[in-house]
Amino acid sequence: MPAVKPNVLLLEDDPAIAGTVAFALEREGFVVRSVGLVRDADAAARRQPPAVAVLDIGLPDGQGLDLCRRWRGDPDPRLARLPIVLLTARGEEIDRVLGLEAGADDYVPKPFSPRELAARVRALLRRAAMPPAPAADFVLDEAGQCISFAGVPLPLTRLEYGLLRALLRSRGRILAREQLFVSVWGDQSDAADRTVDTHVKTLRAKLREACPTSDDPIVTHRGMGYSLR
Ligand code: CA
């Protein structure tokens, strides 16, 4: 018996790109609904929330980024938690950062290989299907400015506490290094990436010490940032 094919909503106004992407996704076993306007994508997702949405950024009637942000704030959890991949222009660093800030789960820079996009969509679906409860978990005590991991209070510095709290608050989402830096240090800096990496390293060592049997809960996303499992 054939399994139900996962439904992908594709928002892309360039017919050539939309055609190639739809072809690649359908070949991978997805059902693709393709639209070229932000308002049509919004209406389609509200009518029937897809398993994954793939959004272009520049559309004739608006921005894929704004749609992403609107869905993230939607009272319907199927939209608020909808796995979203953004199609960004090549080398547009700003698109990548804005995309992650808008709550996208992944982004693929143009021009991309349709097969790679299909692989990313599949990976997102796998992640969305994973059970959310890890064996060792965190307890955040905001009043006491303390975080426990696997029942062990972590001996964190003020900055490590801020970093881990930021990751916990956006659990499961990728935070760009720039975002982490601004939320902990409260400012912009050229040395942001290096500073964040250094503190993540010491944070990891403390988590390992608190619970040596647990997998590293901090996930590094190359070229993007960090997330917490
Ligand atoms: Ca476009």
Image (spheres, helix red, strand yellow):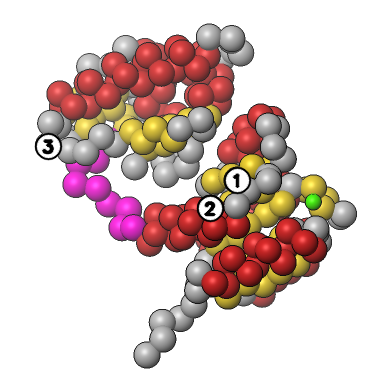
Whole-angstrom CA distance, mark 3 to mark 2, is 34 Å
Q: Residues within 10 Å of mark 2 (few under 14, many from 20)?
A: few
Label 3 close to label 2 by CB (< 8 Å): no
Residue 169: tell me if it is visible.
no
Q: Residue at x 63, y 69 (%)?
A: 23
Q: Which residue is mark 1?
A: 108
Q: Kindly identify the residue that appears in the image at 40 percent across and 28 percent down.
A: 165
Instruction: Verify CB contact (< 8 Å) between mark 2 and mark 1.
Output: yes
Expressed as whole percent of the image width and height from the top left, the position of residue 104 reads 58, 46
Residue at image location 72% in from the left, 52% down from the top? 56
Q: Position of residue 17 (x, y in %)?
A: 73, 58
Quick one: label 3 or label 2, which is nearer the N terminus? 2
In depth, the one of 178 and 153 nearer the eye is 178
Q: Nearer the viewer, mark 2 or mark 1?
A: 2
First along the sequence among labels 2 and 1: 1
Left or right, 74 with respect to 198, comes to right
Query: In the figure, 83 relative to 93: above or below?
Result: below
Q: Secondary structure at mark 2?
A: helix
The single residue placed furthest to the left in the displayed view is 213
* Residue for badge 2: 116
Q: Amino acid at mark 2?
A: Glu
Residue 213 is marked as 3
